[in-house]
Amino acid sequence: MESGYVHMPEPVIASVGASPLGHTDLPGRDLFSLALAEAFDELPAPADLVEAMYVGNQSESYEHQIMYGTLLAEWAGLRHVPAERVEGCAAAGALALRHAVKDVRNGEHEAVLACGVEKMTAAGTSGATDALSAAFDRAIEQRSGVTAPSQYALLAQRYLHETDATERDLAEIAVKNHANAANNPRAQFPEEIDVATVLESDPVAPPLKLFDCAPVGDGAAAVLVTTPDLAADLDRPQVRVAGSGASANSIAVAERDMTEIAGARVAAERAYEEAGIDAGAVDIVEVHDAFTVCEALLAEAAGFAPAGTGYQSYLPPAERATGWTDVQLSPSGGLKARGHPIGATGLLQALEAYEQLTGTAGDRTITDAETALLLNEGGVADAVTVSHVLTTAEAR
Ligand code: COA
């Protein structure tokens, strides 16, 4: 008797593209067109390939636009494909990727486009601050007037209190990410900085200063997820999506442990389990460093660093505390310096890993990297976390 087992294709990323990041004159749909044009540069037209589409997008308040699924499908020349907007604040991009991965994995589609877009500068910093606060619990947090930087400042205060980390260590994380971004032609801030620049920058929400914060910015990204066979037919370098995990935690920070980022730990562990690896196998991680302290917290949550030592992420592996892995953190420059156009961020992380694992990351290539982890979060810290493990095709 035949078993009921049906072989499911392991999804791969077959192409990526992004718009310029930062302050732009373009509306979201045009940013998307630029990302799409790059992703389909050497491919047939999207309408000849794409069977479904997901769009990560944080807020309609920037452009007074919902229906981003329909809008961008139309803009891509697609008709009558399933297309929808996915929201989860800053995790929207990775949620879109996760939906695409599932559609290919379960055999529903052979080619799905995951994309993300945000036009934050349309609202200015105050408008973006207001829009982002919609991700906080309305009953407890929004009414207090608390902002994203001040929520993360609470986490940072607590982290500095509980560990040996200092404000200087957090500043070093920003310095490292700006140095990485200096090798990234896509980066919003491709300038190297020194520790004094961070420590002497304007206070935003103590202990966080201007250079501890990811910026407000525009951007779009597009990631084409296909079956391995289709990617081979298209003659595209492919990167395996070996694992995907997601985890929602309490929406209010008041309900959570501020330094044990449990949602991120669970999401990472789920992705590791699917991929059949542990944290020690990860060569590169793109973390959600919306604020410098996030990189420290996520290094611990993802199993790269013993509790209380994640702040050493800026050090070369040989100089970190015992128990740290050799992982390299955010070669793109991270949210801090590559940029953080909210709905696009999770897909910009995937783009970086694709370029690293296909040897197309230029001067920032991490030699011999085979396995990457992506950690994308929405709301404050781990209100929702989405993680993916990507590996080179050779690692199959
Ligand atoms: N890092 C470094 N420089 C920054 C910066 C950042 N995060 N944000 C802005 N700048 C620079 C700008 O390039 C500009 O430089 P210039 O005068 O040389 O042109 C200058 O600082 C002022 O920029 P502006 O956009 O007016 O800054 P702002 O004071 O309005 O906003 C923050 C600064 C930090 C408050 C804003 O970027 C912010 O809110 N960041 C956090 C966003 C966020 O919460 N994201 C979601 C997290 S989940």
Image (cartoon, rainbow, N blue to C red):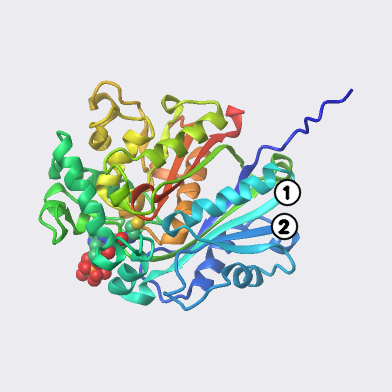
Q: Amino acid at mark 1?
A: Glu
Q: CA distance from mark 2 to mark 1?
A: 7 Å
How crowded pointer 2 is (Cα within 10 Å; few <14, some 14-19, many 20+) is rated as: many
Secondary element at tag 2: loop
Q: Is residue 176 left or right of residue 67?
A: left
- The percent coordinates of residue 389 (x first, y second) are 51, 37
Q: Which residue lies most toward the bottom here?
A: 64
Q: Quadrant of the N terminus?
A: top right
Q: Quadrant of residue 318?
A: top left
Locate residue 259 relative to residue 138 in the image: left or right.
left
* Front residue of 127 and 337: 127
Q: Is residue 23 above or below residue 239?
A: below
Vertical comparison of 118 with 302: above or below: below
Q: Secondary structure under badge 1?
A: loop
Between 358 and 249, which is closer to the camera in this rendering?
A: 249
Residue 333 shows up from this direction: no
Q: Residue at x 60, y 29 (%)?
A: 394
Ligand 1 is found in the corner quadrant, namely bottom left
Q: Which residue is mark 2?
A: 51
Q: Position of residue 20 (x, y in %)?
A: 43, 64
* 65 or 191, nearer to the observer: 65
Residue under label 1, please give it. 110
Look at label 2 and name its amino acid: Glu
Residue 223: mark in rendering: none
Look at the numbered discs 2 and 1 and tell me whether their residues touch, using CB distance below 8 Å: yes
Q: Determine the image quadrant of residue 66.
A: bottom right
Q: Residue at x 73, y 48 (%)?
A: 110
Please state the horizontal and vertical placement of residue 73, each as a whole percent of the image: 65, 68
- x and y percentages locating residue 384 in the rendered image: 43, 49
